[in-house]
Image (spheres, rainbow, N blue to C red):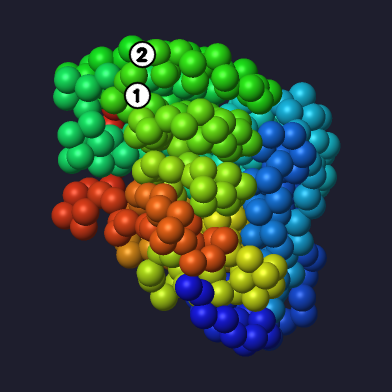
Amino acid sequence: MIKTMGRRQLLKTGTAAGLMTLAAPSLLRAQGDAVVLGHLTPRTGFLGPMGEYAVMAVDLAVEEINANGGINGRMLTVVKEDSVNPQTATTKAERLVERRDLAMIIGEISSASALSIAQVTARANKLFINTGANSDTLRGSDCKRTMFHTEAQNVMYVNAEGQYFLQNDMVKDKKWFILSSDYAFGHDLRHGALGFLERHGGQAVGDELIPTDATDFSSHLLNIRNLQPDLIVVNLAGTSGASFMKQYGEFGLDIPLGGFDYNSSIAWATGPQDFKGTWPCIWTHQVQTDASQAFAQAFQAKYGKPAENQAYSDYIAVRIAAEAIAKTGGTDTAALIEFLEDPATEFDILKDRKGRFDAATHQLLQEVYAVTALDPSEVQNEWDIFTTSGPLPGAEVPLDELIKGAVGGDCTF
């Protein structure tokens, strides 16, 4: 449960307190022009529910920063647009980078749209902080010197969740049925899952790519029923995952569910009766650090519901952008890249360990968590329908262990 306090108090305490240094000593001089960020994320379509959480988190982060004096005395403002598909993302990114006052673009969820935005920002020599696209390829062969990632990449989720499957005897000599979204995100997870299974002595008895607009999974569920795998691995994006789990429940199957991607908004949309399995996640409102609970309380107070993982990633992206601009003294792209790439640059990302960007791929190295569905009889409210593990990997394991085995090719800046 999240304890709540007044929003005015939260703006001056908790996570906001960590932003106080961004305003000093420049509060003593006249405020300059605003710092402008562009925010692109899908607010409609199958990723729309997650995009709405991203927008709410960005608004909260901006409100907190400005309540504490802005960035070196300059107010922060964000221009927000709906990037419903790659074509729209390209058009809107091109429009944003034409602004002379634009510092950088943050956001996105779709890996295909993120690549489109990254190509635009690279040509314009503007930073892009990707907050929701998981594809290993974006950190590999499609990497850009101007692109950084606060969202965890697919291999991080595969490595973290794979350890859970190993510990629970769900890999060696076991049969998996794998369903993956048919675009870059799903392809990465599919390759990662197949590679993990092969390395650890398991077998894939089903391996199917699913269109992102699929709503009827009956043929796949009939196939699963006939094959009787030991584990169903669901790598479906957005509302597709919720639709599958609801239909899985209607079929009355009792085969364990799991996968290498998870979003709390989709779990909540699925509901406690149908949400099942164990999944990897970048963050939930149950993470028990003081900073995470301060963010969770502030979000709850502002919006009347808990934050989820997409909200978290966009929230810390705004904070990281603000800190980078404050500490480099401006919005020069080369200076910002140098600051973010520096192995000595660490960020408070509301977790037990601080995060830093991997200089070779620009992936934010950070802890992840395992989320396990509660039995419906144990659920006490509409939000706490799962439990959240302690941080993964353990404190003794370097964070860069999570990015080993990525399938997206080599990054060359």
Point 62% across, 71% down: residue:
300
Q: Position of residue 357 (x, y in %)?
A: 41, 47
Q: Secondary structure at mark 2?
A: helix
Label 2 to label 1, Cα distance in Å?
Answer: 19 Å
Report the front residue among 189 and 131: 189
The kind of residue tagged 2 is Leu
Quarter of the image holding residue 72? bottom right
Q: Nearer the viewer, mark 2 or mark 1?
A: 2
> Mark 2 sits on what residue?
227
Residue 16 in the image: above or below residue 387: below
Q: Tell me the number on the disc at residue 13.
A: none
CA neighbours of label 1 inside 10 A, class few (<14), some (14 to 19), many (20+): many
Quarter of the image holding residue 133? top right
Q: Position of residue 413 (x, y in %)?
A: 47, 28
Q: From where the camera sits, is residue 195 visible?
A: no
Q: Is residue 83 left or right of 320 when viewed as pictured?
A: right
Quarter of the image holding residue 191? top left
> Mark 1 sits on what residue?
193
In this rendering, the count of numbered labels is 2
Q: Earlier in the sequence, mark 2 or mark 1?
A: 1
Q: Position of residue 5 (x, y in %)?
A: 59, 85
Q: Secondary structure at mark 1?
A: helix
The kind of residue tagged 1 is Ala
